[in-house]
Amino acid sequence: EEEEEEEMGSSGKLYEAYNELHGLAQEFETPFDAPAVLVVGHQTDGKSALVEALMGFQFNHVGGGTKTRRPITLHMKYNPDCEVPLCRLVSDSDPTVVQVKSLQEIQVNVFHSLRLQRAR
């Protein structure tokens, strides 16, 4: 049990250091090689399900058929004090436009977008 706590503490420090480096790179507009995962596959191959499994929470609508209609970029930041995910939607056309939403609000947004697409 003590080993687990020690391991969690060192992981937390690693996440904090990474977050600080990433923040400084953005502040100084310096390229920063961040770990990245690119998921590519055919429609309905389970790309979003894989990403959701890695994140530990669902952000997309689940069910049969195609769900994710366009590319999605996700940036994750570790915060040991955060009990629920905090999501920021950044506009494709204007990256300065940011909306802060809860995971539940994101899920509702995805559901409504899917409904509108089906109505077309």
Image: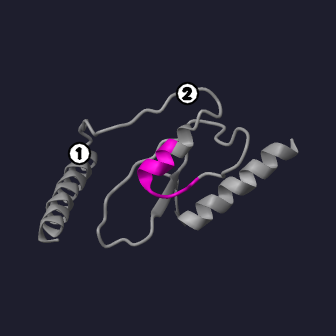
Q: Secondary structure at mark 1?
A: helix
The secondary element bearing badge 2 is classed as loop
Label tally? 2
The residue singled out by tag 1 in the image is: 25
Could you say which quadrant of the image residue 59 lies in?
bottom right
Residue 30 image-quadrant placement: top left
How are the residues colored? Answer: one colour
State left or right for residue 14 relative to residue 60.
left
Residue 40, percent across and down? 51, 28
Q: Amino acid at mark 2?
A: Gly
Residue depicted at x 67% and y 62%: 108
Work out whether residue 92 can be spotted: no
The residue lying toward the viewer, choosing from 22 and 18, is 18
Q: Is residue 35 visible?
A: yes
The disc labelled 1 sits on which kind of residue? Ala
Q: Earlier in the sequence, mark 2 or mark 1?
A: 1
Q: Is residue 32 left or right of residue 77?
A: left
Q: Position of residue 77 (x, y in %)?
A: 34, 56
Residue at 73% over, 43% down: 64
Residue in front for this viewpoint, 28 or 78: 78
**Residue 43 placed where, x, y %?**
65, 30
User: Which part of the image, by quadrant, shows the N terminus?
Assistant: bottom left
Residues at discs 2 and 1 in contact (Cβ within 8 Å): no
Q: Chief secondary structure of the magenta span?
A: helix
Q: Residue at x 23, y 45 (%)?
A: 25
Q: Which residues are magenta?
A: 50-59
Q: Which residue is mark 2?
A: 41
Residue 7 is situated, as x and y percent measured from the top left of the image, at: 15, 61
63 within the magenta span? no
